[in-house]
Structure formats: C-alpha cells, structure tokens
C-alpha cells in the first residue's frame, strides 16, 4: 500500500513538470503557421570609374554617375526603368511559393518605386528568391493593356513601358550617353519581345548565400537588392559600346542584353529580419 501511495504522489508531482517542459518546448519553436509580408528594396548602382574591382559599386545618380564597363568604356544614364514580376520564394527542401499577381515597375526617377511589398507569403524559412526581369507572355501579349488597373496598375501603358505598335511591354528601358567616344553618342536600350527567337523574358535568381529569409506572421523581413546597370553590357554576351547601334525593338540584340542582365545584374546585398 505504501508503495502504491508513493507512486501516485510521484505521478502527481511529475505531471505539472512534464506539462511545463512540453509548453516551454512549444513556445521556443518557430511559428511556421499563417502568412507574413516580405519587403523589397532596390538600389541601382554603377561601378565607380577607374577603380573597378577596388571599391564597391556606387549608387546610380541620373545624369551624373559615370558607369564604366570592364573594358573601360564609360557612359551616363538619364533613364533606368524595368519590371520585376512573378516573384517566387524557395525553401531548402526545394518547395516553392509563387506569389500571385506580383508586377512591380522600378524607376530610378521615382523614389517610391524603389521599394515594394509582397503580402501573404506562407510562414517558413526560405533560402532563395527568383523573379522575371520583365513581364510574362500571358500579361504582355495576350491581355488588353487598358484593363490593367488596381494591383496590375504598373502594367498600364500610361507608364510608357509599352509598345502600342508591337502589342507588348518594354521590359527594360535604359537611356543615356556614351562618354568614352569623341564625339559622345546616345545610348539607348528598350528591351522587350516574348515570342520565338525574339523572346527576351529572363529570370534572375540572386543568391542568398548563407542567409535565410524567415517569414513569420508577426515579422516583415526585407530583401535588399542591388542592380548593377553595367550588367546590361557585361555577361554571357559582352557588348562593345563604341560599336553598339542601340536596341529599340524586339530582336537578337535585345535577347542578348536580356540574357546579360538576367545572369548578373541583381545581387542580394542583405536580408534584414525586422
């Protein structure tokens, strides 16, 4: 009888301890339920003239910054706009979340366009992000652009990123001046095209490195992107600017420039947990 009484007392004492231990473990575990928001900031940059590889890229200042290519050619920029769309987040196990209806127009001349938010991302730890630099074929070629309002407002032709004569969006617009020639000459890139050999839709997937993006219902982490304007002309298809006649419409040259910026223009500078 004494043994039974002692055992019962031990069970009564142990039960609260077990419950407390269980509760503590649960509270220490990350909450991977619900959804959270992910903020993006974009800083457009140029390599500093004459010191390529020595100092980090400098913030792009329209009509002022002097960009230098790896071969030493220089240019200034007066217009720099592009679409980022179809944003996708990837976990370490390979599963992905495709954020719906994500179409953002980044314009160096418009400060508020240099940051945006993707809402309703499922909570979890993500190890990568990717996005189209441009607009997918469904939106750029198969939809009446006048209907683009509300969450699709950035796609409206009112922003002058649409070829009405060609029925398609301009994915990337860079206008400036080549300054390393005498005399100087205009430098123009209007990149677009979504069919066949003129398909300039490319996907960028800048690496997180060893960082992770922790999305939680009570947090809004930020991915800080940098975009190097020189990468339009440096990559799989290097461009000699002194021989460059400009890209004004869909074509082989537009595709090559798109492949360049898709491969290396974007980097993740840092991820802030917030």
Image (cartoon, rainbow, N blue to C red):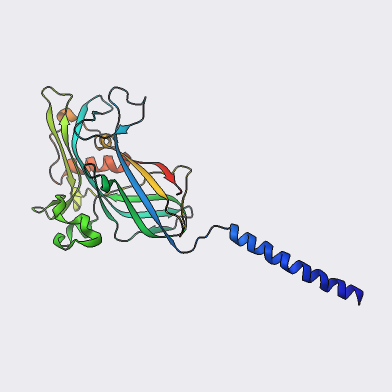
| Residue 221 to residue 25: above or below | above
Q: Quick one: which residue is furthest to the left in this view? A: 165
**Left or right, 256 with reference to 165:** right
Left or right, residue 108 beside residue 42: left
Q: Answer with the quarter of the image where residue 19 lies.
A: bottom right
Q: Nearer the viewer, residue 240 or 109?
A: 109
| Residue 65: percent from left, percent from top | 24, 30
Q: Position of residue 15 (x, y in %)?
A: 74, 69
Q: Quadrant of residue 158?
A: bottom left
Q: Residue at x 60, y 62 (%)?
A: 26
Query: Going 35% across and 59% down the picture, which residue do you hit?
Result: 99
Q: Residue furthest bottom?
A: 1
58 and 253: which one is in front? 58
Q: Residue at x 18, y 24 (%)?
A: 180
Quarter of the figure with residue 80: top left
Where does residue 44 sit, x and y in percent of width and height? 29, 39
User: Which residue, as the protein is rendered here, is positioned at the far right?
Assistant: 2
């Amino acid at each position: 009888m004494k043994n039974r009484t002692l055992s019962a007392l031990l069970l009564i004492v142990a039960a609260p301890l077990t419950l407390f231990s269980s509760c503590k473990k649960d509270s220490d575990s990350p909450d991977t339920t619900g959804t959270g928001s992910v903020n993006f900031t974009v800083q457009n940059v140029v390599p500093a003239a004459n010191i390529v590889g020595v100092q980090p890229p400098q913030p792009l200042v329209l009509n002022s910054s002097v960009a230098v290519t790896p071969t030493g050619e220089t240019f200034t920029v007066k217009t720099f706009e592009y679409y980022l769309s179809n944003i996708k987040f990837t976990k370490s196990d390979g599963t992905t979340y495709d954020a719906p209806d994500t179409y953002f127009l980044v314009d160096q001349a418009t400060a508020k366009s240099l940051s945006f938010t993707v809402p309703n991302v499922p909570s979890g730890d993500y190890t990568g992000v990717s996005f189209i630099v441009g607009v997918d074929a469904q939106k750029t070629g198969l939809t009446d652009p006048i209907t683009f309002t509300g969450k699709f407002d950035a796609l409206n032709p009112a922003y002058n990123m649409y070829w009405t004569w060609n029925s398609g969006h301009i994915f990337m617009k860079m206008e400036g001046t080549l300054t390393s020639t005498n005399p100087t000459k205009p430098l123009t890139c209007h990149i677009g095209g979504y069919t066949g050999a003129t398909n300039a839709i490319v996907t960028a997937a800048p690496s997180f490195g060893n960082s992770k993006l922790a999305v939680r219902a009570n947090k809004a982490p930020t991915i800080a992107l940098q975009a190097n304007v020189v990468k339009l002309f440096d990559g799989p298809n290097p461009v000699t600017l002194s021989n460059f006649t400009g890209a004004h419409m869909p074509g082989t040259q537009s595709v090559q420039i798109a492949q360049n910026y898709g491969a290396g223009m974007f980097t993740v500078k840092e991820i802030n947990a917030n």
